[in-house]
């Protein structure tokens, strides 16, 4: 399906041509300049010089940035305009509340607490009359994206029980999360799912990517939805990754998308360019019968954690593949000594990875630090508070922040219990945290934190989620701002 154009889906192919101008003689002695396209002549690997050295259709792509300094003073300089500027580390300053290690001591916002800055804001209850289609009344796939005027909140309606129709809705918010306009229909596509993509900076020029599945004719096709800084949306498809919802199928490294999935009982891995177009599919160990696949990403590497089903003895072994930020193989498939669990998480850290194992219902979840190669750095232990992270994958989010050496986590434990917003260190220990009740919908004794998504601003973090609703009524989409408190 790559290279096609169907129903407004944008496909990007590579045209590897150089244009030269040749003067030729015209009639009556006149001269005419004709443009003649000539194949690009590769001169070697790509370097930062404003030229397409490897003839892949992109100039200065995949150039590794230069870094200097340490901890919060770490500075990164990228190739821009064919030049990499001199790298100068940031100078330490007094610590203030901005989610940054200002004084460069390895701690972020020390001396400040974390808590809500305002009450939760209800963004949605209903869009239109849905008749007898009860599932059409519920919003799913809640997401929030920074824009020039503030934020755009998005969600898709579950129309699987009724007439298929455009179902991606959104609402524009100001810098404090307050609605600026009524709910609007954002696209004419029919969405089946909408989920976050773990995306590191710098973001693609097209905007923040979201992992989506669309209905195209009679096919359910995986793709990407980009939201740019003006709040405009664009669908790009298809991407190759398919699989269960609520696990990372595709990640953005800052320069490439990496996708992993199962096809014909074998592991498949692909690298996509910044536009979401297939660049190449990698040769990987077949790892037959992969039972579960999840991805993690951190600064300059991608981890692909694969659980493989084994019949004799009946068990599941775990394998780790590591790629660099450009999607090149760093470590082929390697068996690692880590216990499997449904909807397990692989969170990037400075040391390597943090493996989070939800465990069965009611059992405390565990965390285990791993090296970049997947070797255990310590035994698996429960969290300090004995939490149980949802084993459905739809009630938590873990967002690595490599420049600050921490992970932003939002979760609910137990199901129907308190909402938690916190920052974790590389070993999964809490650095700053807020925990409190979720605002209840009328007629409900408890509510759910479902499909959470986050957006970081200069001095606050916005969390969006949807809850439940009684008697098949429309559910609510809510957003709340968190930041430093005394």
Image (cartoon, rainbow, N blue to C red):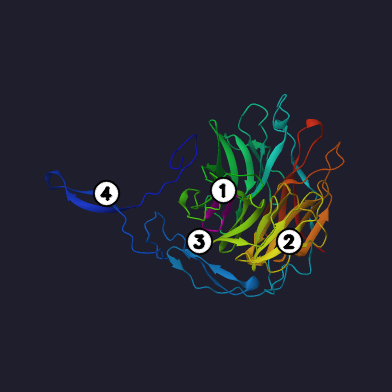
Q: Quick one: 156 or 364, which is closer to the camera?
A: 364
Q: Residues within 10 Å of mark 4 (few under 14, many from 20)?
A: few
Spatial distance from mark 1 to mark 3, Cα to Cα? 17 Å
- Note whether 412 is above or below 212 in the view shown: below
Q: Which residues are magenta?
A: 249-261
- Identify the secondary structure beneath mark 2: strand
Disc 4: which residue = 35
Residue 393 to residue 372: above or below: above
Does label 2 or label 3 sit earlier along the sequence?
3
Residue 350 tag number: none
Label 1 Cα crowd, 10 Å radius (few <14 / some 14-19 / many 20+): many
CA–CA distance in space, label 3 to label 4: 40 Å
Q: Label 4, label 1: how many angstroms apart (C-alpha)? A: 44 Å
Q: Which residue is mark 2?
A: 367
**Nearest to N terminus: mark 3 or mark 4:** 4
**Cα distance in 3D space between marks 2 and 3:** 26 Å
User: Which sits in the foreground, 92 or 426?
Assistant: 426
Q: Residue furthest top?
A: 131
Check disc 3 and report the residue beneath it.
329
Q: Position of residue 127 (x, y in %)?
A: 70, 32
């Amino acid at each position: 399906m790559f290279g096609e154009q169907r129903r407004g889906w944008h496909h990007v192919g590579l045209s590897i041509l150089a244009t030269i101008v040749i003067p030729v003689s015209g009639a009556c002695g006149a001269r005419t300049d004709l443009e003649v396209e000539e194949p690009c002549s590769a001169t070697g690997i790509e370097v930062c010089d404003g030229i397409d050295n490897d003839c892949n259709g992109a100039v200065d792509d995949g150039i590794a940035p230069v870094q200097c300094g340490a901890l919060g003073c770490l500075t990164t300089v990228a190739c821009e305009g064919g030049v990499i500027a001199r790298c100068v580390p940031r100078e330490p300053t007094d610590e203030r509340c901005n989610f940054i290690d200002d004084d460069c001591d390895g701690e972020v916002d020390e001396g400040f607490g974390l808590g809500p800055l305002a009450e939760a804001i209800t963004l949605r209850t209903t869009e239109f009359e849905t008749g007898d289609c009860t599932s059409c009344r519920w919003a799913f796939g809640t997401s929030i994206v920074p824009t020039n005027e503030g934020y755009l909140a998005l969600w898709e309606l579950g129309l699987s029980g009724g007439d298929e129709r455009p179902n991606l809705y959104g609402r524009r918010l100001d810098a404090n999360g307050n609605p600026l306009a009524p709910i609007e229909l954002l696209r004419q596509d029919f969405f089946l799912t909408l989920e976050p993509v773990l995306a590191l900076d710098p973001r693609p020029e097209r905007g923040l990517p979201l992992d989506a599945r669309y209905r195209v004719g009679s096919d359910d096709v995986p793709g990407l939805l980009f939201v740019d800084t003006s709040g405009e949306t664009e669908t790009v498809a298809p991407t190759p990754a398919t699989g269960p919802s609520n696990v990372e199928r595709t990640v953005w490294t800052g320069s490439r998308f990496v996708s992993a999935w199962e096809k014909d009982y074998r592991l498949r891995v692909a690298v996509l360019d910044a536009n979401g177009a297939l660049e190449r599919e990698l040769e990987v160990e077949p790892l037959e019968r992969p039972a579960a696949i999840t991805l993690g990403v951190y600064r300059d590497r991608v981890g692909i954690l694969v659980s493989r089903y084994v019949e004799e003895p009946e068990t599941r072994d775990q394998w780790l593949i590591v790629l660099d930020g450009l999607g090149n193989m760093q470590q082929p498939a390697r068996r690692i000594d880590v216990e499997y669990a449904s909807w397990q998480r692989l969170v990037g850290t400075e040391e390597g990875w943090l493996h989070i194992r939800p465990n069965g219902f009611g059992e405390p979840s565990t965390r285990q630090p791993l090296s970049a190669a997947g070797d255990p750095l310590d035994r698996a232990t429960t969290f300090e508070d004995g939490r149980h992270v949802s084993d459905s994958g739809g009630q938590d989010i873990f967002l690595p922040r490599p420049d600050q050496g921490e992970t932003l986590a939002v979760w609910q434990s137990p199901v129907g219990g308190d909402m938690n917003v916190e920052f974790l260190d590389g070993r999964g220990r809490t650095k700053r945290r807020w925990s409190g009740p979720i605002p209840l919908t009328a007629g409900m004794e408890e509510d759910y934190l479902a499909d959470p998504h986050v957006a970081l601003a200069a001095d606050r973090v916005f969390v969006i989620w949807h809850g439940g609703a009684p008697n098949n009524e429309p559910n609510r989409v809510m957003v709340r701002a968190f930041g430093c408190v005394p």
